[in-house]
Image (spheres, grey):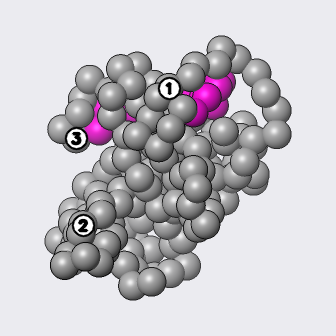
Amino acid sequence: LFAFADPQAAPMSQPAAATAESGEKVTIDTRFGRIEFDRAYTVNFPKGIPGFKEYSEFGLTNLPNHEDDNVFLLQSIEPDDLSFVVVSYDPAAGIIDWQDIMEAQRFLGISPASCAMMLIARFENKGGQVTMTVNMRAPVFVDVTRRLGWQHILPNDAYEVRQELQG
């Protein structure tokens, strides 16, 4: 669960863990096991996610049994048959140009202090070795104050849809 009320509690690079419990809870059998989500902390995607427009409410939680605390599960609440593994993105990494980030924030109406960014990850088995790629071209922007999210396609074609991460 994540605290979205205080923009200072959720820096742009990673959502902060919630300390308060409130709202209706929903338990979902995810591909990673049974997980409980508090609807008071879900993120609404007003336009859905490209290719999945009918999915608008998502819970966000740490990926179970994963040692990297920058990897999360973005789980659709209703219907509950869609989820994405996402990786928090730190703009200080400089992989996505700061100007492109600021343009997206302006377009989406998110203040920099309220913005968290994530990248949708994809896993592939290449000859017995699992590799992870992330979609740098269409990051997920979350307004942590309003609990609204968008997967925004950046107009700069310099970013890869499947950028392999080096571990």
Q: Residue at x 67, y 42 (%)?
A: 2
In x, y percent, where is residue 71?
52, 60
Name the secondary structure under disc 1: strand
Q: Return the residue at label 1.
A: 28
Q: Return the residue at label 2.
A: 124
| Chain-order first, disc 3 or disc 1 | 1
In the depicted structure, whether residue 161 falls above or below residue 26: below
In the depicted structure, whether residue 19 falls above or below residue 77: below
Name the secondary structure under disc 2: strand
* Mark 1–mark 2 CB contact (< 8 Å): no
Quadrant for the C terminus, please: bottom left
Crowdedness of circle 3 by 10 Å Cα count: few (<14), some, many (20+)? few
In x, y percent, where is residue 66?
56, 61
Quadrant for the N terminus, please: top right
Residues in magenta, as a range:
35-49
- Per the image, is 138 magenta? no
For badge 2, the amino acid type reads: Glu
Tell me the number on the disc at residue 50.
3
- Direction from residue 24 to residue 134 in the image, left or right: left
| Chain-order first, disc 2 or disc 3 | 3
Tell me the number on the disc at residue 153.
none
How many angstroms separate mark 3 from mark 1 (CA)? 23 Å
| Chain-order first, disc 1 or disc 2 | 1
Q: Residue at x 29, y 38 (%)?
A: 49
In the depicted structure, whether residue 67 falls above or below residue 145: below
How many angstroms separate mark 2 from mark 3 (CA)? 21 Å
- Direction from residue 9 to residue 61 in the image, left or right: left
Crowdedness of circle 2 by 10 Å Cα count: few (<14), some, many (20+)? few
